[in-house]
Amino acid sequence: MPRPSAAESSPRRPAVVLAAFGTTAPEAMAGIRHVEERIRDAFPDGDVRLAFTSAVVRDKWRDRGRDEAFRAAHPGLDALYDLKSPLTTLALIQEAGPRPVFVQSLHITNGSEFDDLRNLVDRLAGLATHRGVKKPFPHLALGDSALGAGEPGDLDRAARALEPLVREARKIDAALVLMGHGNEHLAIRSYRDLGNVLRERYGPVFLGLVEGEPGYEHVVAEARKARTWKLLLAPFMLVAGDHALNDLAGEDEDSWASRFRAEGFAVAARLQGLGELDAWADLYVERLKGLVERYAKTLE
């Protein structure tokens, strides 16, 4: 992604920060890039910038940037070697002068990573000065993750966005198994609730998590109960990174693919992140449109 020119960074030009967890797998960047392209197409006048919320991921790319052999073997990744955090990205935007700034989360749920991002945005948006006209961020707003607060409307939109994966599984007479990341956050219930919506809408679709419940044991029990013995495995993550390549479809005996095969299932894997689906990428586009529309109403 090229750096904005001075003209592109005009204080009058709205800024959009796309905040993703990030990935260390170069091939997995396709999911993030596709979302970025859809948002650039939808907001051609916006100063769109990408930021990674994971310090571990940013550090990994900085180390690679100093590795001449890696750079030579992976051309076209220059923008990743100095990718910033959301905080640093917002500071650089603010330095260029006052303008509306919209931060769009590229996370799956409003979980722990999203909470950290929300705390950051809320605190920066609340910064005050003696003279209000000099407020560092006159307008700063955050867009929800793909599943948002997990309300019925959020889950219904997400389920409809996943229909292409269901169709792909049906073409090979398989049930769809989705692996999400999960965590110990309360937002983990959104995964369970979405799994219920998917089954109601499409039949045998199973959603499990690397961390937390429902996990692998729940998924395999549900698949047995449904008496479906052919499975299409796919990551329920923005990118098909380390978890997809290893925990989901890896050759090790503890991967989901290996464990399902050991249970007698026929298994195929789809190693593409959700961000590569137009319909899923557009969930973030719609979130961002909502932010922009609400801001426009404040100017009326």
Image: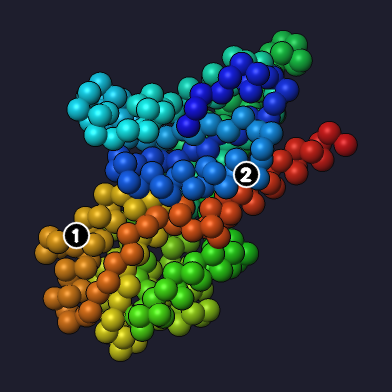
Of residue 166 and residue 190, the one placed in the foreground of this image is 166
Instruction: Give the structural element (helix, strand or loop) at label 2.
Output: helix
According to the picture, the residue beneath numbered tag 1 turns out to be: 250
187 up-or-down from 93: above or below: below
For the question of whether residue 151 can be seen, the reply is no
Q: Is residue 239 left or right of residue 269?
A: right
Instruction: Give the structural element (helix, strand or loop) at label 1.
Output: loop
Point 22% across, 23% down: residue: 68
Q: Look at the image and tell me in which quarter the C terminus lies.
A: top right
Point 27% across, 71% down: residue: 268
Mark closer to the observer (2, 1): 2
Mark 1 residue type = Gly
Of all residues, the one furthest to the top in this rendering is 130
Sort mark 2 into few (<14), some (14-19) or many (20+) by Cα contacts within 10 Å: few
44 up-or-down from 272: above or below: above
Point 69% across, 19% down: residue: 11
For marks 2 and 1, the one nearer the N-term is 2
Q: Is residue 124 left or right of residue 294?
A: left
Of residue 224 and residue 171, the one placed in the foreground of this image is 171
Mark 2 residue type = Asp
Q: Position of residue 105 (x, y in %)?
A: 52, 43
Of residue 187 and residue 138, the one placed in the foreground of this image is 138
Sort mark 1 into few (<14), some (14-19) or many (20+) by Cα contacts within 10 Å: some
Q: Is residue 127 left or right of residue 33?
A: right
Instruction: State how far apart marks 2 and 1 are (Cα).
Output: 35 Å
According to the picture, the residue beneath numbered tag 2 turns out to be: 41
Point 75% across, 38% down: residue: 295
Which quarter of the picture shows residue 67? Answer: top left
